C-alpha cells in the first residue's frame, strides 16, 4: 500500500524524512502535521536547511525488517 498521507505514515509505523535533491541531504523531521495532509502538499512548503533549495521531497521510511534499524540520515 503506498504511503501518501500523514495518516498512512502513522498507520505503517513509518518516520518522515526530507530529502533535498539539490544537495543530497536526508534528515528525519518531526511529524507535526494533520492526518489528512499529503506528503506532496507538505513538501511544497519546505526548504532544505542546509542549502535553501525548495527541491525537496518527503519520504516515509520504515525500519529494516531484518536488522530493526532505521535508514541512516545522510548528506
Image (tube, rainbow, N blue to C red):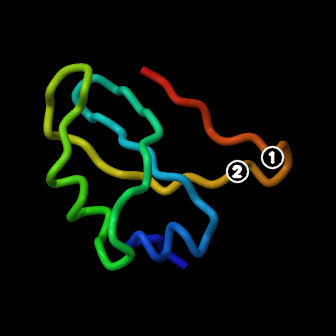
Spot occupied by residue 32 in the image (x, y as percentages of width and height): 38, 57
* Labels 1 and 2: the sequence-earlier one: 2
Residue at image x 80%, y 46%? 68
Q: Which mark identifies residue 59?
A: none
Under circle 1, the secondary element is loop
Left or right, 22 with reference to 10: left
Seen in the picture, residue 59 relative to 3 is either above or below; the reply is: above
Task: Give residue 36's quadrant in the image.
Answer: bottom left
Image quarter hosting the C terminus = top left
Residue at image x 43%, y 55%? 31
Q: Which residue is mark 1?
A: 68
Under circle 2, the secondary element is loop
Spot occupied by residue 5 in the image (x, y as percentages of width and height): 38, 73
**Residues at circles 1 and 2 in contact by the CB criterion of under 8 Å:** yes
Task: Give residue 69's quadrant in the image.
Answer: top right
Seen in the picture, residue 15 relative to 21 is either above or below; the reply is: below
Q: Residue furthest right?
A: 66
Spot occupied by residue 17 in the image (x, y as percentages of width and height): 44, 45
Is 42 in front, or is 53? 42
Left or right, 72 with reference to 68: left
Image quarter hosting the N terminus = bottom right
Spot occupied by residue 15 in the image (x, y as percentages of width and height): 54, 53
Q: Residues within 10 Å of mark 1 (few under 14, many from 20)?
A: few
Residue at image x 29%, y 72%? 37
Seen in the picture, residue 3 relative to 71 is either above or below; the reply is: below
Q: How many marks?
A: 2
Q: Residues within 10 Å of mark 2 (few under 14, many from 20)?
A: few
> What separation in Å lies between label 1 and label 2 (alpha carbons)?
5 Å
Q: Which residue is mark 2?
A: 63
Amino acid at each position: 500500500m503506498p504511503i501518501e498521507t500523514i495518516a498512512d505514515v502513522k498507520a505503517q509505523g513509518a518516520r518522515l524524512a526530507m530529502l533535498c535533491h539539490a544537495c543530497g541531504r536526508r534528515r528525519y523531521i518531526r511529524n507535526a502535521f494533520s492526518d489528512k495532509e499529503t506528503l506532496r502538499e507538505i513538501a511544497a512548503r519546505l526548504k532544505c536547511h542546509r542549502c535553501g533549495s525548495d527541491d525537496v521531497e518527503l519520504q516515509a521510511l520504515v525500519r529494516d525488517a531484518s536488522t530493526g534499524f532505521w535508514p541512516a540520515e545522510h548528506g
